[in-house]
Amino acid sequence: MEIPTFASIAAAVRKAVAKLLPGGPAEAPAPAEPLRYPWEDSYPPSIDWRAEIPVKPVTDILDDAAAEFPDNPCMEFMGKRYDYKTVAKLVNRAAKGLQDMGIGPGDKVGLLLPNCPYYVIFYYAILRVGATVVNYNPLYAKREIARQIIDSNTRVMVTLNLKTLYPKIADRLQDGPLERIVVCRMGEILPFPSSLLFAFARRKEIAATPPDERHMAYERLIDNDGGVTPAAIDPATDIAVLQYTGGTTGTPKGAMLTHANLYANAHQVDMWAIGAKRGEERFLGVLPLFHVFGMTGVMNTCLLYASELILLPRFHTADVLEVIHDQKPTVFCGVPTMFSAINAHAELEKFDLSSLELCISGGAPLPLQIKDKFEALTGCTLVEGYGLTESSPVCTVNPFGAGNRSGSVGLPLPGTLIEITDRKDPDKLLGHGEHGEICISGPQVMAGYLNKAAETAETLRGGRLHTGDVGYIDAEGYLFIIDRIKDLILSGGFNVYPRMVEEAIYLHPAVDEAVVCGAPHNHRGEIVKAYVKLKPGALLTSAELRAFLKDNLASFEMPSKIEFRADLPKTLIGKPSRRALIAEEERRAAGYGRPAPDDLEDAVAT
């Protein structure tokens, strides 16, 4: 049976009306009984797939929580807590400072920050004045950050005064659209006496910044009365966030996510989490907030619940276990690598993980053995979900409790339509169990790609978001993913785009040809592997190439394996064939070929 679509419902209604109009006007027919999608019968009883999804500005998330629960804890970082009224005041003061700086509707403001209170404050402050947040991955190399600054036309960047961050953007004040840098001090967000200890013990990590007008200290920026003039926001059209992604082509593009997109997705996740209590939950915030999964699934959803966000700047297994043991979070969103690392910790029995109630895995396929072991250790159901940057990101999630189906990424969220189209004929819809491209429609689907009309038209053709993923829907409406059309590498929850890594490798003068692909890995899902052909007479080792790449790639993009070859397989038109090499890796993983030596260094793996 073919899966009904919104278009088919409308066509059926038009056909019924036409039958009543043989030669002239007729009375309107009685409303037809709406067609039901297969997942509706699989829905938890308390959730309505057809429920109305609010269209609101993202800023309403914080405003509503602060109005209802002003004294509740909003976030905790390294032992320092902030209640909702304090965060709301800091957001207004930061917003006023941005307005005084000349930032307003349509301007782009970048966040080059790890998980910390500054991220939350500036995210909502930027949106308050009608500007657009541009998320930057702090692990990116200078070259990648410079490209994104130019493409997005980022005017102001917010970062920390750390040598690992500030130097990556300091030179951009000279050669691009970047006009100002807001410099935040780490010591300001630490409790006493940790703030003093950091300034003394970690002083070698602090970057010096020039005392000029192009640099604005955070303390100076918020030195005002908070009397911001909120911008008039049209949630349906105003862009809240530019989230960079390789999309279905591997070329970084800015996905334009509207206020309505992001508010809708947080609300959809809120509806799905049956049993969550507003004002009482505690979210473990270890997923990077600059990543769309962390931004929506952790930060925005947490604040929509008026709950507490426990922030960790990075994932370190022992630190995460201590936080769960001591601070008792109830909600944990993560990637499979995180849950795998917890399962494998040598001293796991020392930690009480029983506070966890709602856990969601995304970003990569969740192996059944990881899911089963984590559930046995914690007593908490770990459900798998699916999404992508262009959908803000969550599209499907398994039900909590009854209906949680292993191997599936779950049911479509309320208001989300999943359709499977024929890969050779994108206009043809497939039925239950038939394999094709996964397509998505819903209120969380992006407005398009920044300044890329052709790519937008291709990805959103036919009114659907074409994901580049291959899968099927079963008779009960559960989505299963079986393959990827795109070349994206999912390594430990990070998205790695082969083309970006190849570009960096080609910068080395000894390299003639290079192909990068994902190689299967038990813990990380995939690792980055580079196949390299050198120029005649050239000599180069794996260690030398990695040393060269250090300043051109983020650590998670660094090839874990490098295999030098005299020749690389080619396509029919003579291009190096990534598909042929992927097939080789799949055969090796299946035991039909000798795996290449594993020269994975611990520093790269972590």
Image (cartoon, rainbow, N blue to C red):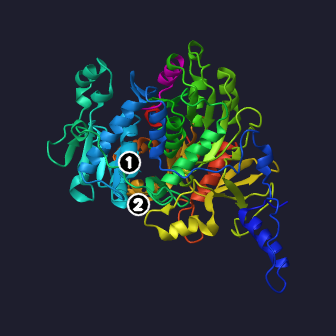
Of 9 and 595, the residue lying toward us: 9
Q: Residues within 10 Å of mark 2 (few under 14, many from 20)?
A: few
Provide the residue designation for mark 2. 536
Q: Residues within 10 Å of mark 1 (few under 14, many from 20)?
A: many
- Please, is residue 424 above or below residue 540 in the view? below
Provide the residue designation for mark 1. 128
The reply to whether the magenta stretch includes residue 478 is: no
Q: Is residue 564 visible?
A: no
Q: In whole angstroms, how far apart are the C-alphas of marks 1 and 2?
A: 58 Å
Measured as percent of width and height from the top left, residue 147 is found at 35, 57
Q: Secondary structure at mark 1?
A: helix
Give the magenta range: 313-325
Mark positioned earlier in the residue sequence (1 or 2): 1
Q: Amino acid at mark 1?
A: Arg
The reply to whether the magenta stretch includes residue 322 is: yes
- Please name the predominant secondary structure of the magenta segment in the image: helix
Residue at 33% from the left image edge and 59% from the top image edge: 153
